[in-house]
């Protein structure tokens, strides 16, 4: 599956970033890999996005510097977690940013 079918979403609690990966399948269904290591299936991309927004996640692609600053971090402080293995990825889905000085 190509990276073009993957979107990263995040929620923030203070200086803690919680990631979620939205993956759209070729058939139009979608799945969200969450910070607990669960893969949640949805009937459509829109349904998956709505569920993420209901949980107060925002799309990384939609964030600008002002949005990030309002959430307590700078865009250059964050990057989606990376791993070829979902078990390993689960351990990287919650990131505590260092305190600001």
Image (tube, grey):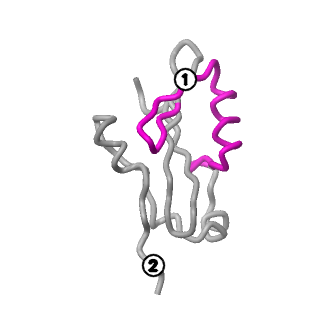
Residue at left offset 43%, top offset 33%: 3
Residue 49 belongs to the span the image colors magenta: yes
Q: Is residue 7 magenta?
A: no
Quadrant placement of the N terminus: top left
Q: Which residue is rendered at x = 34% and y = 45% of the image? A: 82
Q: Position of residue 20 (x, y in %)?
A: 51, 43
The relative height of residue 62 versus residue 38 in the rendered view (above or below) is below
- Label 1 secondary element: strand
Q: Residue 75 placed where, x, y %?
A: 52, 64
Pick out the residue farthest to the top: 27
Determine the secondary structure under disc 2: loop
Residue positioned 58% across, 18% down in the render: 29
- Judge left or right: residue 1 versus residue 63: left
**Crowd rating for badge 1 (residues with CA inside 10 Å; few <14, some 14–19, many 20+):** some
Q: Is residue 95 left or right of residue 24?
A: left
Q: Nearer the viewer, residue 35 or 70?
A: 35
The residue where tag 1 is placed is 41
Range shown magenta: 32-61
Splitting the image into 4 quarters, where does residue 42 fall?
Answer: top right
Q: CA distance from mark 1 to mark 2?
A: 35 Å
In screen coordinates, is 87 left or right of 69? left
Q: Which residue is mark 2?
A: 99
Location of residue 17 in the rendering, given as x and y in whole percent from the top left corner: 50, 59
Please state which of residues 24 and 88 is positioned toward the viewer in this rendering. Answer: 88
Instruction: Locate residue 57 relative to residue 31 in the image: left or right.
Output: right
Number of numbered discs on residues: 2
Graded by Cα atoms within 10 Å as few (under 14), some (14 to 19) or many (20 or more), the crowding at tag 2 reads: few
């Amino acid at each position: 599956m190509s990276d073009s079918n993957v979107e990263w979403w995040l929620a923030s609690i203070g200086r803690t970033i919680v990631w979620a990966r939205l993956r759209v399948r070729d058939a139009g269904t979608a799945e969200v890999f969450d910070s607990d290591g669960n893969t949640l299936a949805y009937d459509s991309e829109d349904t998956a996005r709505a569920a993420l927004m209901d949980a107060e996640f925002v799309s990384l692609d939609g964030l600008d510097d002002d949005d990030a600053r309002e959430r307590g971090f700078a865009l250059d402080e964050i990057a989606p977690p990376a791993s070829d293995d979902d078990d390993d990825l689960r351990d990287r889905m919650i990131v505590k940013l260092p305190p600001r000085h």
